[in-house]
Amino acid sequence: MDSKTFRNEGYNLIDWIADYLDHAEDFPVLSRSQPGTIHDALPAAAPAHAEPFDQVMADFEKLILPGVTHWNHPRFFAYFPANNSAPSILGELLSAGLGVNAMLWQTSPAATELEQRMMEWLDDLIDLPAGFHGVIQDTASTATLCALLCAREKSTGYEFNAKGSASLEVGRPLRIYCSSEAHSSVIKGARIAGFGDENIVQVAVDKDRAMAPDALAQAIETDLAAGRLPCCIVATVGTTSTTAIDPLQKIGPLARKFDLWLHVDAALAGSAAILPEKRWILDGVEHADSLVFNPHKWLFVNFDCSAFFVRDPGHLERVMAIDPAYLQTDRDSQVTNYRDWGIQLGRRFRALKVWFVLRSYGADRLRAMLAEHIAMAVEFRDWIEGDADWELLAPVPLNTVCFRFHPTGFAGADEELNRLNKDLMDRVNAAGRTYLTHTVLDGCFALRLAVGQTGTQRRHVAEAWEELREKAGEAS
Ligand code: PLP
């Protein structure tokens, strides 16, 4: 593609994206694509000869777009948001244009130093106590894996890195503690880091689904008495099902008492700590050894961008660093080489989009947008609570509401109520105007509405509520 064509097609593409963002609402939010149809519509092999770009774009619209689920849609209430913004898209584009691999300071000093500064800005915005140092990872899953590796090496004095599982005494496994509501990435990370599923202790939760510190203390004591080796606590600030907040103020002192690594998974909720009225969610974080939160979830930085903070970067580097001759530079003793702060060697220049977003919005506007999302979720909660045919299933500390349709006088079995709600969710999602997903709470099929898309306004939440009631009415 020559420069003239690139320019023209590039302008067209920006127009396309701008129109798309303006009209995301016109698409069915959940793709109606059936399994295999897109794959089958594409040629079996790459083209032998060049094709014009406008033809490629035409095929994108015809073949690919129908298979897109629209995360930018203002009635995307599923999972947690991966919200987005124009400045972030431009930062991503510029990063692609530069084509930088930010693996070493030398491979682009600006990428490393902007990343350092952006992590300081994020650290300041969520008001972390002094002494944390940050790095951008792709996802919270990766950051949690890094934390678990750090914990493992702390417990084994770097012996696991050296000798593998032979460093552990038979019958004395390393143990990880998280709540029964922790994200699946903790289990996956523990598997990859060699702990084994059986050594993840899922600690009981209280009535608000937050980790019960007494149960945690008990689990650690039991393990110690049995000769097992407590290693790491993963506390979740903002669980995936209900955004429950594990009490760091009580968990932290236990981590210190038993000398365990404390990792805080605040994947979604960390962003809310920029709000002074929500900063309490991180009270006690001064006890943590590491923390992750995802600007790509709820801080208008497009996927992917995960902020990982550690207290002791020297330890992280010692756990991660491998120093082959071909990666060494004369500056290594003077600079940060982020290749040693994570799993992968090659790293994208993600700090650029963070910088674009933080400067384009400013902290005030970011705070206002998050506060609006929370206010919309709280209003939706009030609608649920104010209607006798609906039931709230969990507290709403942030932007996510768990609820179900439970018509007055319903006398059927629990399974029937679960089926009714699953069917309701399926019909709402099939209609294409609203997309929400579910969780299961104490055996109850719970509908889940998470407010966090950039374009979501009060009317979109009201429309979702209207549609839920309308569809529920058709069923009962
Ligand atoms: N932790 C929590 C609490 C989450 O809710 C999620 C995803 O929703 C994750 C971790 C995983 O995030 P990622 O996709 O960035 O790995």
Image: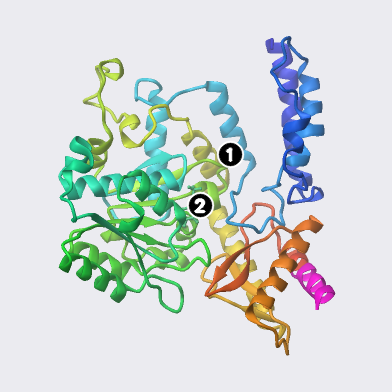
* Residue 7 falls left or right of residue 393: right
Q: Position of residue 429 (x, y in %)?
A: 75, 58
Q: Point out the stretch of residues depicted in magenta.
A: 465-476
Q: Which residue is drawn at 32% across and 36% down?
A: 341
The residue closer to the viewer here, 308 or 85, is 308
Q: Position of residue 110 (x, y in %)?
A: 41, 26
Tell me the CA gap for discs 1 and 2: 15 Å
State the image quarter where residue 55 is shown.
top right
Magenta residue check for 113: no
Does 437 sit above or below residue 337?
below
- Its colouring scheme is rainbow
Q: Which of marks 1 and 2 is in front?
A: 1
- Please tell me how crowded label 2 is: few (under 14), some (14-19), or many (20+) other residues with Cα within 10 Å: some
Q: Residue at x 81, y 70 (%)?
A: 471
The disc placed on residue 88 is 1
Q: Position of residue 287 (x, y in %)?
A: 26, 60
Give the residue number, with chain letter if any, for mark 2: 363
Q: Which residue is drawn at 59% across and 57% down?
A: 79
From this viewpoint, which residue is outermost toward the right? 474
Decide if ligand 1 comes within 8 Å of the CB at mark 2.
Answer: no
Residue 144 seen: no
The residue closer to the viewer here, 301 or 110, is 301
Magenta residue check for 472: yes
Q: Which of marks 1 and 2 is nearer the N terminus?
A: 1
The amino acid on which the numbered mark 2 sits, given as a three-letter code, is: Ala
> Where does the C terminus fall, quadrant-wise?
bottom right
State the image quarter where residue 382 is shown.
bottom right
The amino acid on which the numbered mark 1 sits, given as a three-letter code, is: Ser
Residue 161 seen: yes
Q: Position of residue 77 (x, y in %)?
A: 66, 59
